[in-house]
Image (cartoon, rainbow, N blue to C red):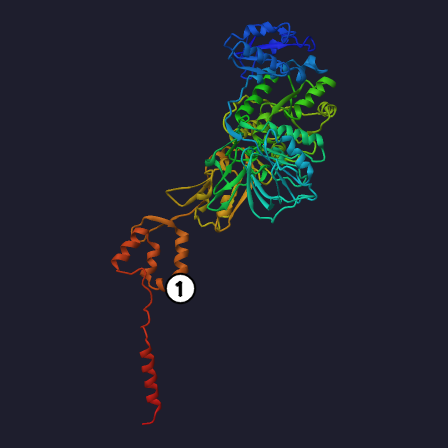
Amino acid sequence: MSLNGKRLLICNCEGTMPIDGKALARACTVGADGRASREGDLEVFTQLCRSQLDRFRKVLGNADPLVVACTQEAPLFEEVRAEGNAAQAISYVNIRETAGWSDEASAATPKIAALLAAAGVNPPPVSTVPFKSSGVTLVYGSNEDALSAARQLASRLNITVMLDRPADIPGQPKMDIPVVQGRVRNARGHLGAFELIVDDYAIPAPSSRGVLKFGPPRQGASSRCDIIIDLTGGAPLFPAHEKRDGYLRPDPKDPAAVQRALLEATDLVGEFDKTIYVQYHADLCAHSRSRKTGCNRCLDVCPTGAIVPAGDKVAFDPHVCAGCGACGAVCPTGAADFRLPPAATLSEKLRTLLLTFHAAGGHEAVLLVHDGGHGAPLIDALARLGNGLPARVLPVEVHSIVELGIDFFASAFAYGAAAVRVLSAPRRGDLLPLAQSVGLAEAILGGLGFGSGRIGLIDTEDPDELGGALRALTVANAPAASRHLAIGNKRELAKLGLRHLHKAAPAPAERVGLPPGAPFGNVVVDTGGCTLCLSCVSACPTGALIDDPDRPRLRFIEDACVQCGLCKATCPEKVISLEPRFNFLAEAASPRLLKEEEPYHCIRCSKPFGIKSSVERIAEKLGGKHWMFSESKMLDRIRMCADCRVVTQTEDAIDPYAGAPRPAVRTTDDYLAEREKGREKKEPS
């Protein structure tokens, strides 16, 4: 059977899944687009990976891409494809642990149809950045354990041992491994390009007899290496050190962990390609303008320090980025575009999954969002050892749960999800961006009358606890599903989803207040203090504040405002404040007048050149109070346009740099002459 142009191969895994081929074929008949999408009959195999493997070989010659409903035997299928030099695309989808191995498997037909349809949504290819490591390795420790570890690696890597405040290290009969003393003051870089600043650097004395003795220490020494093995047990050299490629920091008290780190180090030699997780669009960045700081959201949440300020923009280091997706989740403009997968691809997957589920007869869909490292093994254990996932629970695997932003939650509920649960490991410390996104989504859902608690976190390592939490979940009716296409960047996807939710809301409020820091909102201007200097317009990075070239007025487009605060920081009169909210009215997309004044017309040529109130205020403050404007004709120049000022100045032959008459120059002779005259007056004649 073909589904949306992709050939389906379904296996019931030796009859362990109760798959009804005819019912599943009917469920796949109508896809997310609402049109018939199935071609041919659905054959359900029983042992596709063994006795029926020839059936897989047979379809490899076709040009149509394949969707194989098995992930366990994907390596075998890939091996067979390589043997046949088949170039067609193959997607693998797990319907066994996620649906078929469950005590509700008989009711899981809509879920299986949805998972098969969503498997056909393939992300675009990603770019990579190269790493090159020659194996130059620093073993950083404080005792003989560092020397022992270094000896294990000496035949495979170029090793140097650096000891921090060593004590009673026995002298070495043969210095076949370089040993130095030092304390790392500062470290930066990544696999293949670490740079260290070392204090108390010293080399051992050749005459060391009982224990190693080191020479005079030197401060601020620099060093480079490809790999760092940190066995000090102290503070890590990098933030989020477990995400730094090439930096290995096992617990020195755990011999097994140390051995794993040494084994991993031997594999870090050569050339590697790393995925570029984030595409940065500098033209959308709202970080700073004219040395005024606006948005720091990505800088505040990046755990590895891969993002740093770079003038009015920020700079991303793809070598250091660990791909957590936090920057993309909190970026209000889409400047930090997380690409694994792109936001539009993920929203399209949600659209296909949920609309197919509903079209096949499913109801009260609950999305279980998880990452592969923690969530997939837990779901697998629940299926193998427990009751499996409920039939209404649709698992959605993402690269990182931290990448989930308001666009994801808005799309999920707009496409008809009744609830979303995010599966996390307990005591995970990087969930602040996720918490912000959940709080924002809950505020909007609550403001529209959908109630609270539709989004939640399940933090567990126990599969039974996961299953119990999902089965105990009670949700109200899901919003009416929208069929809108997933088009645009993260912000556009969020606005699309929220506006479709507004149409289906039980209490469709016109405006919903949001928590501080939200990426949507209003700009409030105290018009009494505003002088229409328009400095806010030049500072606004998104064009939300705009002027008018024909007359002095300030306008505002609420849909474009990201609440970065640059207008507030730039305003010299301090009359601007921010109001976080989401405006569902059509007026949010159109320019709204904030302040307008009459233009001032030149008293000589009548051309408008300024703001009437400002010109009159300046004339009032300077008239008769400054020597340059003591005469009325001088004061009149303030009321003229720039061209007329030059003309009248030339006509009157006025030196613009002239000042009051300077006093005559007096010399010593002048003072002596005055002294003599004074003496003559005093002497009697």
Residue 40 screen position, x and y as percent: 55, 6
Of 577 and 135, which appears nearest the observer? 135
Q: Quadrant of residue 79?
A: top right
* Residue type beneath disc 1: Lys
* Residue 671 vertical position relative to residue 370 in the rendered view, above or below: below
Residue 499 screen position, x and y as percent: 54, 29
Residue that mark 1 sits on: 625
* Residue 681 vertical position relative to residue 559 in the rendered view, above or below: below
Residue 350 seen from this side: yes
Residue 359 screen position, x and y as percent: 60, 15
Residue 633 screen position, x and y as percent: 31, 60
Residue 7 seen from this side: no
Q: Quadrant of the N terminus?
A: top right
Of 551 and 188, which appears nearest the observer? 188
Q: Is 384 placed left or right of 618 in the picture? A: right
Q: Quadrant of residue 156?
A: top right
Q: Quadrant of residue 26?
A: top right
* Residue 101 vertical position relative to residue 154 in the rendered view, above or below: above
Which residue: 59% across, 12% down? 77
Of 269 and 602, which appears nearest the observer? 269
* Residue 560 vertical position relative to residue 618 in the rendered view, above or below: above
Q: Quadrant of the C terminus?
A: bottom left
Disc 1 is placed on an element classified as loop
Of 88 and 537, which appears nearest the observer? 88
Badge 1: few (under 14), some or many (20 or more) residues near its Cα, within 10 Å? few
